[in-house]
Image: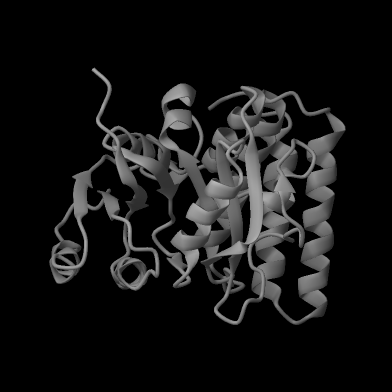
Amino acid sequence: MPVPESLGIDLVVPTIGRTVEVERFLSAVSTQSWRRPARVILVDQNSDDRLAPTIDAFHDDFEVLHLRSEPGVSRACNVGFRECTARFIGRADDDCWYAPDTLARVAEAFDAHSEWDALCGITCDESGRPTQLRWDKTSGVVTRKNIWRRAIGSTLFLRRSLAESLGEWDESFGPRPYGDGTIRGGSEDGEYLLRILERGFTLGYDPSIRIFHAEFTPSLHDTKSMRKAYYYGVDHSRLLRHYGYPGWYPAWRSAQLVAGAGYFLVRGEPGRARFYGAMARGRLAGMFHSGS
């Protein structure tokens, strides 16, 4: 039987290892100008109950559905999406938070563009400075060519009917546990976004929709972050191959990162320079990596 649909929005938030950031996200949801129901589906990958006090603090503000999942971002997304009943779904990172008008702008964009099956906004800091990507300044439709300037998972909102058509998140992509005890990988959002396009659905882009997400600034000697960057790169190139991008394209994407590393080195940010360099090496390695 089809699931009864509510008129609100379900916000799926996979989380592990964070508490202050989760509290910030929930606080931002509680101050939204949009007054239709918003439910947060918090998919907890922690092995303890660290989030219980945070969830209890928002008990009177809105519904928080607290679910459990084994580690793995795509796995956690699947756990959360299975419980969605609202007309719209938002996929949020646990270290992002919303501007007060974010959900109102999402609703307005879907109302104005009935042809959009999903949409993305931008990530920025609280001053409005763009973070994570070099975002396009104009709105429009996302394509395979402009996707890396117009779409990222933490700004994704979609009609639940689209989620049902697409099926589950691909658990062979995204940060996931390995037999040696490490968690590595990435590109789960890229896979989902490219699948939207491949299946012939329309993904819109509206830069007036702001998702606050601080720029990541690792220290030069943060070995864990450099390893994470490398495996992000591996999965990114594997994703490009999976979706039929030409062979030269991952190399060009790697060259962009090398240029970025040089830029940050000149600016006196060696940590970010090394992070970009590690990701570039991962992208080159991923051109020849066939495993999952």
Q: In the rendered view of the protein, which quadrant contains the N terminus?
A: top left
Q: Going 43% across and 54% down the picture, which residue do you hit?
A: 92
- The answer to which of 268 and 129 lies nearer the viewer is 129
Q: In this view, does 125 lie above or below 22?
A: below
Quadrant hosting residue 82:
top left
Give the percent coordinates (x, y) of residue 70. Answer: 27, 40
Residue 146 as seen in the image, left or right of residue 193:
right
Give the percent coordinates (x, y) of residue 13. Answer: 35, 52
Q: Going 41% across and 44% down the picture, which residue do you hit?
A: 89
Q: Is residue 6 above or below residue 289?
A: below
- The answer to which of 110 and 141 lies nearer the viewer is 110
Residue 290 as seen in the image, left or right of residue 163:
right
Quadrant hosting residue 53:
bottom left
- The answer to which of 270 and 211 lies nearer the viewer is 211
| Residue 11 visible from this viewpoint | yes
Q: How many marks?
A: 0
Q: Going 84% across and 61% down the picture, which residue do you hit?
A: 259
| Residue 170 visible from this viewpoint | no
Q: Going 51% across and 34% down the picture, which residue do you hit?
A: 173
